[in-house]
Image: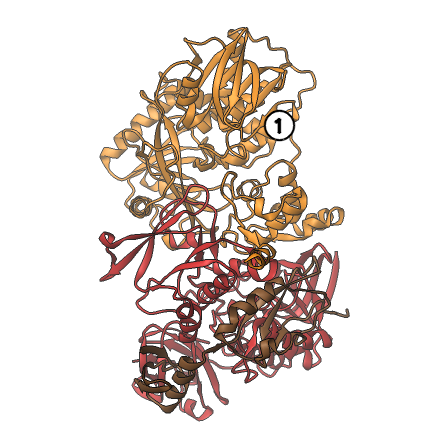
Amino acid sequence: MNSQIYDVAIIGAGCCGASIARKLSAYEISVVLLEKCVDVGFGVTKANSGIIHAGFHHPITSLKARLEIRGNLMFDQLHYELGFPFKRVGIIVVAFSVEEMKTIEHLYSQGVANGVPRMEICGRERILSLEPQLNSDVVGGLYAPTGGIIEPYRYVFALVESAQKNGVEVKTQFTVEQGIREKDYWIVKSKEGETIKARYVVNSAGLFADEVSKSFDAELFEIIPRKGEEFLLQRNAKGLPNHVIFPVPGAHTKGILVIPTVEGTLMVGPTAIETDDKYDVETTSQNLETVFMQATYMVPAISRREIITSFAGLRPTMKGNDFYIEPSKKQPHFIQVAGIQSPGLTASPAIGDYVKDILKQEGLQLIEKKDFDPFLPHPIKVRELSFEELEKVVEKDPKYGHIVCRCESVSEAEIVEAISKGHATLDGIKFYTRAGMGRCQGAFCTYKILKIISRETGMPVEKITKRGDNSWIISQRLQALADEKAER
Amino acid sequence: MEKEVICLSCPNGCHITVQETSPGEFQFQGAKCERGEVYAYEEITDPKRVVTAVVQTDSEEMPYIPVKTDKPIPKRYINPLLVQLYKQKISLPAKCGQVIIQNYMETGVNVVITRTFPLDLGK
Amino acid sequence: MQERNYDVLVIGAGAAGMAAALKVAEEGLKTAIVDREPFLGGILPQCIHNGFGVHLFKEELTGPEFAERFIQDVVKSDIDIYLNTTATSMAVHQPVKQVNLCSSEHGVFRINARAIVLAMGCRERNRGNLGIPGTRPAGIFTAGLAQRLINIDGYMPGKRVVIVGSGDIGLIMARRLTWTGAEVLAVVEILPYPSGITRNIVQCLNDFNIPLYLSHIITKIEGKERVEAVEITPLENGAPNYTKTFKVECDTLLFSVGLIPENELTQSAGIKINPETGGPLVDTRLMTSAEGVFACGNVLHVHDLVDWVSDEAQRCGKELINFLQGKTEKIEQGKVIAGANLKYVLPNRYRLGEKNRFSMRSLIVRDKATLVVRQGEKTIRQFTLRHVKPAEMFHVELKQEDLNDLVSNGELLPIEFSLS
């Protein structure tokens, strides 16, 4: 057993855990980030819509509204330091009736009370000039220019990379099974048979925060998964809007959105359906119908013929629908960060700060690191380079000249970089580099990537997975077949 | 014994019913032309297929090289032939048309390589 | 930056690119051919089965053998070959066209050419395009990817396989997988008839007792990490009948559900696309909306037989030569309309003074059909066709004399093809 006692162990490397880890990496403490999946950001975060909300959807009396507003403001700085793609494209909420315009007015005044800057109530003409793709039946709407978009997994990768750079340890495939309090620290045991010790534990385990809390003999509560299905359409899809388009919200959800992603594809969704299965990420044909009906009502040009893929994710909701971020009342030095559903991604940088403050109040001594480096080098992406820039890059490393993923223009060098940063599954590489994320969905690059992973890691192809566990790609090599046949 | 054969002699694709009236004697029904009966007779008495596969090489750059039988081979030989091919390992260079198995099991069928490797681009 | 000058640059070194390049190089034009892969031949080297070349070479060849006939000629010719090289962008609306290329081998460079042949082939439709419900586990491949993994790399994609779509690649893969020790449990086809040719149904499915479910669809994919099962549902009167849904346990799912011309480079260069074919709009010269840029093979429209690809590419090469020699720089062309029961007619232009060849696809299945070519009320020509179906492209030729009397007020009148 590792005899080191960490100051803080964070359970769950989603957007919250990663934000907390990165925040704590600025202080003279030892931190370990524990993740049950094969890679970080592979849980709830992976299937997030990637919206940075403006902050007008929730009343300021809620914790989530306060953190949302603060979080939104922090993204420019984070983007500058970490380089993940982020665009403040603005959010538009569209109304199709006088009745809906009343809700727009309510959202506007709520936003003003929350401190959302530069919002605007728009009439029909104004809204259509902002977004000519809208259904011309639109009556008016709300324009919030501070809303934005990111790629959630690349945001988490960047946060974790920055945290690691500043000394945080990351353990993937560490499924927390039990926490035992001993003397003044926790012993945290994993299902995989590993054990670590930490003085403070942060429970940001997303969908499994309730189970983790129980396994530490802390509060009993229930995480209710609420499923959201999303559909991704190709680059330059018909109907691609300039802003994120929202309908007037329902009682529990913000509705089906039309999202121009940071990479130029178009996304529609998500649905919001409660489920009792924390692994239920199935998509259904009924929901495809629902999503497209609602999306095309707002933006008629959207065509389902341009779908390149669909996916589903689960939001970890809790009774009361607010975030649950506070020190456990049952157990010492155990901080709950649970029920982080929408707008959790937007709030996540603020959650990092908030949890840091809680830890400080709970007695953790925080001394700023003198050599904390907030910056990450901006990785080279061939698709973003001019031809002249590409020439210089290829001169230095010819691997940038080998385009492995033709759809998203990803070079071999970028894939090698992803692997060197620990993303050695097909999904890890896909989310880090976009290789395999385009229109052909990996038909032309999977075999190349398998070989690069094998070459870089020494792993035989049969051991390579899509996303860890039993998600193998290749059952065996033909040679093995020969041996099998020979035995018979 | 009654069997159905789909004739591949032309795009018509006649479904021909074949009945063995007495040992070695057959009756054909459903063929629109005579070629159908000839085809069905062979398909019933001694069906043959061209086999294609890949064979392991000693090269990392081209770990497998494609091969084929140069003529159709009776179906009963296909599995044993495949087993032999999977066990075989050949040294490169290989030339398209190069014979790797001569007169397999006295059938008169050879197995030949169907791709030249390495290829000298010469430029 | 390094710049190289050619008369003709051919993008893509598959069946189409090689045939076109050989044609223009024969004429003494300085020609270059580029391809992303480290070898010549495009997709052919992975198509190790036989059945290629019956029309072109009058014998049955395997894919690698068919490719090799062209490869040997390309190697012997004066054509400059750039392998492992990707065309990243091009400027084509000018007399000298510029194509930007990058490669780990040749670095980053530009080719200037008087003419370009687009021959990038096509890609496969995939699960995402179909919107099939269920989970997203590992073990879902396009048939072509599985073919590549087995035949080139020697990797088996799985042990218990269900194939979606009865196109020829899917059928060929059913046999290939069986011969490599996998078990193919079902082939599922949405249409009431198979998409592949009869020979493949017999030799790739029936030989191994692999069930073919016609008018069936996959209604769910199961499995959290790796594929575990699929649900198959029959279509009745066009709608799935879920009371008859059944489950097949498997670890692998292969999609063989159609091909899409690969035209992102074309589109980014501002060349017009024909929505019916997914390829560039071309005239009778097989020239795209950018003067001096030609297209042939699967990038233009998806072919069923490589023989027709080579044929079209050679024709494309000839047209390109005529164009560069100034013979066809300005020609009058009339409109061609795809009428009843035709998905498209390619090219959708005709010209006078010579025979015209057209390729087309039917929207209907008929044992015997009549193709009528009309100008207004007047029938120009009539063809009797056998065995037309959407899965098989067919070709007709109009003779020089068929096309007389089609001028009115100095303009060529439109002609219409229709099938019944």
Picture colour for chain C: red
Q: Which residue is mark 1?
A: A162
- Letter of the chain that mark 1 sits on in the rendering: A
Figure check: B3 above or below C290: below
Residue occupying the point 64% across, 46% down: A454
Query: Residue A36's spot in the image, x, y percent?
Result: 50, 29
The N terminus of chain A lies in which quarter of the figure?
Answer: top right
The C terminus of chain A lies in which quarter of the figure?
Answer: bottom right
Picture colour for chain A: orange
Query: Residue A174's spot in the image, x, y percent?
Result: 53, 27
Picture colour for chain B: brown
Query: Is C64 or A225 nearer to us in this picture?
Result: C64
Say whether residue A143 is left or right of residue C237: right
Query: Is B84 or C381 nearer to us in this picture?
Result: B84
Colour pattern of the rendering: by chain
Residue A87 visible: no
The image quarter in which residue B71 lies: bottom right
Query: Residue A270's spot in the image, x, y percent?
Result: 36, 38
Q: Identify which amino acid the numbered label 1 is placed on.
A: Ser
Figure check: A161 above or below A452: above
